[in-house]
Amino acid sequence: MDVRSARSLGMASCSLCHKLCRFVDNDEIAQYCPRCGTRLYSRYPNSVVHTWALLITAAICFLPANLYPIMVVSQLGNDTPSTIFGGVVALVHHGAYGIAAVVFIASLAVPFLKLIGLVILLIKIQIGWHLNASQCTSMYRMIEFIGRWSMLDIFVIALLAALVNLGAVARIEAGPAATAFGLTVVLTMLAAMTFDPRLIWDKEVGDE
């Protein structure tokens, strides 16, 4: 079966409204969607380079996000720092298995799997890894979907800090890992945005 891409037919899809537009593949000519005015690209410029840069930075931030305390609980002058994994262990110890599972998945598993998933997609594009393009596309859609749930820890800390503030008696503050974790989440979300999933299919349809 002869499979043709929009690019080979002189067309491009708008990244905002998804209108299929006539497109001349020339980097020197700026072209815009006639419906919403968004600039058209056959492929996002330097998509792979930008995605790699964001992923490497996110991976660097992911280490201190898990090694340093993400929350410090102060009770009667005694400070008790807690890492993400330490918080999961404490929840399990107190029998809150459901909450522990949610925190573990949202704060540890999801960011790590997003990093690994995008690395796999980039390697497929760059070295021609023989992976099913449909499965890779599904993986990319899942990465985009789950990204919105990765800020759970930050929301919980912000809520607790606002609710538990009894001066010298008890208070909860965000630890140094909170900033690193927030950066990790934001950077992985940006990496997913800069990655162009159309690159997955270029080799499948013979586009170069």
Image (cartoon, grey):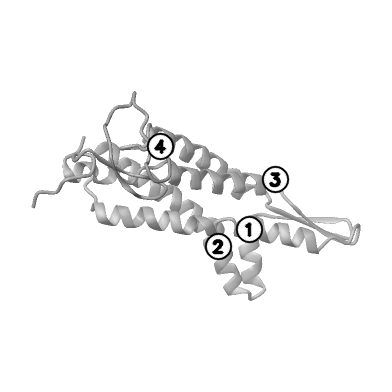
Using residue 86 as the reference point, say whether residue 150 is left or right of it.
Answer: left
Task: Look at label 2 and name its amino acid.
Answer: Phe
Q: Callout 3, which amino acid?
A: Pro
> Real-space Cα distance between discs 1 and 3?
13 Å
| Numbered circle sitting on residue 153 | 1
From the viewer's perspective, is 76 left or right of 101?
right
Residue 152, picture quadrant: bottom right
Neighbour class for label 3 at 10 Å: few (<14), some, many (≥20)?
A: some
Residue at position x 14%, y 49% in the image:
3
Foreground mark, 1 or 3, reads 1
Image height of 99 relative to 24, above or below: below
As drawn, the label of residue 104 is 2
Q: Nearer the viewer, mark 4 or mark 1?
A: 4
Q: Residue at x 37, y 32 (%)?
A: 45
The image quadrant where one finds the C terminus is top left
For the residue marked with disc 4, what is the amino acid? Answer: Arg
- Name which residue lies at 70% across and 45% down: 176
Which x, y percent locates residue 103? 58, 63
Badge 3 is on which residue? 176
Q: Secondary structure at mark 2?
A: helix
- Residue 166 image offset from top left, x and y in percent: 88, 62
Identify residue type, mark 1. Asp
Residue position for label 4? 39
